[in-house]
Image: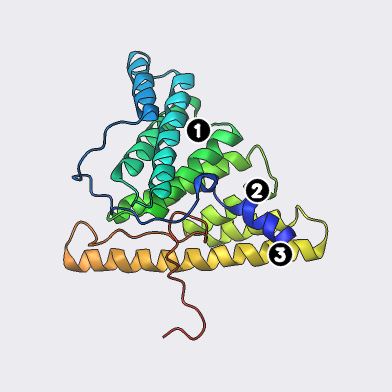
Amino acid sequence: MILSILAILVVMVAAVFILVARPFDGGDSSAKALPPTPLERGAERIERRLAKDPEDPKLLLAAMRTWFGAGYNRISEARNAYRPFPYAVTADLKTGLRAWEAYLRQTGGEASVENAEFAGGVYVSLLELGSKDVADIEANAAEAARALRIASRHRQDLYTLSNVAVYDYLNGEYAAGSRAEREAAATFDAPARAAIVIEQLDAYRERAETFRGLLRKAATELRESGDEELGEPLKAYVASGGLNEEDPTPRPGDN
């Protein structure tokens, strides 16, 4: 029981929208534009209000959450119809994150636990959706980790500390991730339960190490080729219930 509960707790905020994994269209922004959804139209109305008062923190949060909702709604619709995720998913999520980043500038880097965890989960969703731009991937990983550090300043429970560890691992911050992993395990008094936390988070670290290795290899190939972008999007595999189900982690017996 504890194993299954922890598996649910550690999955990113975005995972509540997951039904059945579907492919992504590769992030081709030149693809035919889709008509706006009701949520996107609502987000655009908030943007028009925000243009008149761009420093209003309440409007920035409203824009952030509405764009996030629009992006995840497109994911849900695509999955229900067994279609690839459209580029609009990435566009919506990135627009919401621009509002989040503006909000942090207004607050001096402070935010509520809920907003920080939501934003951090969206950055990880972008890692799962993938990008051909290595710098974009690095920035998303760094901002995900930053968001969870904000959350952990206010709450240090199993859920938050577990995600701090996972996001630090995705950002290549293994020492910081290990500290958060131990702190997450320490939320249980029973040694057996703490051991389960360690075991599960170690698996996330393994997947993150594979991701970081692929990212380093991709960066090297770009430097050597002189190309500006990868030929195919590089995606992070975070969990079996995530947006990317293609696990690249080598297993025993793999060639």
Q: Is residue 142 visible?
A: no
Q: Which residue is mark 2?
A: 159
The answer for how far apart the CA atoms under marks 1 and 2 are is 21 Å
Under circle 1, the secondary element is loop
151 left or right of 213 in image: right
Q: Quadrant of the C terminus?
A: bottom left
Does label 1 or label 3 sit earlier along the sequence? 1
Instruction: Please state the horizontal and vertical placement of residue 2, each as a whole percent of the image.
Output: 74, 59
Q: Which residue lies under the disc numbered 3?
A: 196
In the rendered image, the residue lying farthest to the top is 52
Q: Earlier in the sequence, mark 3 or mark 2?
A: 2
Q: Position of residue 119 (x, y in %)?
A: 49, 39
Tell me if 138 is positioned left or right of 185 in this view: left
Picture quadrant of residue 234: bottom left
Image quadrant in which the N terminus is located: bottom right
Q: Residue 243 bears which disc, if any?
A: none
Quadrant for residue 204, please give it.
bottom right
Q: Which residue is mark 1?
A: 109
Is the Cβ of the residue at disc 1 closer than 8 Å to that at disc 2? no
Query: Quick check: 74 above or below 62?
Result: below
Q: Look at the image and name its color scheme.
A: rainbow
Residue 69 at x, y percent in the picture:
45, 34
Q: Position of residue 37 (x, y in %)?
A: 35, 31
Category of crowding for the residue at label 3, using alpha-carbon neighbours closer than 10 angstroms: few (below 14), some (14–19), many (at least 20): some
Residue 66, picture quadrant? top left
Amino acid on which disc 2 is placed:
Tyr
Question: Closer to the N terminus: mark 1 or mark 2?
Answer: 1
